[in-house]
Image: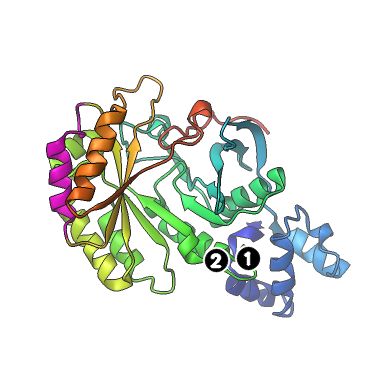
Amino acid sequence: MKNIRDFTLAELEEELVSIGEKKYRAKQIFAWLFRGVTSFSEMTDLSKELIAKLSENYYIENIVDSKSQKSKDGTVKFLFILRDGNAIESVMMKYKYGNTACVSNQVGCRMGCNFCASARIGFVRSLTSGEIISQILEIERQTGEKISNVVFMGIGEPLDNYDNVMRAIKIINDPKGFNIGARHISISTCGIVPKIRQLADEIELQCNLCISLHSSKDDVRSSMMPINKKYSIAEVIDACKYYIEKTNRRITFEYALVDGVNDSKEDALHLAKLLKGMLAHVNLIPINKIKDGIYEKSSTEKIMSFRDTLNDNGIVATIRRELGSDISAACGQLVRQQKQDV
């Protein structure tokens, strides 16, 4: 059986025709899915015969919130159990401009970044598009609040699950789906160069691209992020320039500040030189502590000095507001529990 939430509207139209139904039925079913129904029997404008046919051929992915936690700042972290018993974490963050869902796209991660808790759990599998969008639907159902922004910054590397992430984005962006504009959708990647270039060619998807950089020096970045041994900083920057040229979209470079590793004035000047002339913004992240982590957060003084040095040298830089760190929901802190029975 197939998860009916895995299909874009166009794909669902093809599916319905393939089982002998009228194409227009797909729009009805698609609309019901984004009203949050959990069974075909809730689709009250469909015939009993069609509901029976759908039940025989498809299922609706209903992930289960095993344990949610609420931060003192209003951030909510969810532990979702998937159909196969694997678990992922998702986060809802509240801002003045609306609610943001931080979604996972894989069970575990194979990138191995040593400042990220997700890397510790290893890679199990990629999520389908339906499992990705189910996180948003369940967050809305649990909280009773509308999601207006989506960031692919949870567990997993989005460009390592490219096809499913792109399909999920098309569903999120669809006016008959979540109707969330592409410019309210952000993809964060550690820098898989061929996929950055492929993303640049997805002209119809004007999403925000965020690059986890964390150092402008290859030796330092390689010590933090194994992916740098495959794709050097120069290669990543070259792909980013291609992305900017193709889309005319600004790229956000994420930079986690680690005490004594990448937070000196020299590091800031080196980064400013690297990004000079690019349509770029630097998002400075005071690194978040993870269990048995080897890194310590830079001091507030160093963080502010790093930002000021970048700004003084023509690079727009801001310090990310820390949300959810008291419930381990902040950047780099998401993990999953072991596979369990449901």
Badge 1 element: loop
Please tell me the numbered disc located at residue 177: 1
**Where does label 2 land, which residue?**
173
Q: Is residue 11 left or right of residue 202?
A: right
In the figure, residue 288 lies in which quadrant?
top left
Residue at 19% across / 43% down in the picture? Answer: 309
- Amino acid type of the residue tagged 2 in the rendering: Asn
Q: Amino acid at mark 1?
A: Gly
As for residue 253 lying within the magenta part, the answer is: no
Q: Position of residue 88 (x, y in %)?
A: 54, 38
Image position of 291 with respect to 64: above or below: above
Note whether 308 is above or below 178 in the view shown. Answer: above
Q: Position of residue 316 (x, y in %)?
A: 27, 53
Circle 2: element type: helix
Res 219 seen here: no
Judge the density around disc 1: few (<14), some (14-19), many (≥20) Cα neighbours within 10 Å.
many
Q: In the picture, which quadrant includes the C terminus?
A: top right
| Range shown magenta | 260-276
Give me the residue at 83% from left, 58% from top. 42
Q: Is residue 264 magenta?
A: yes
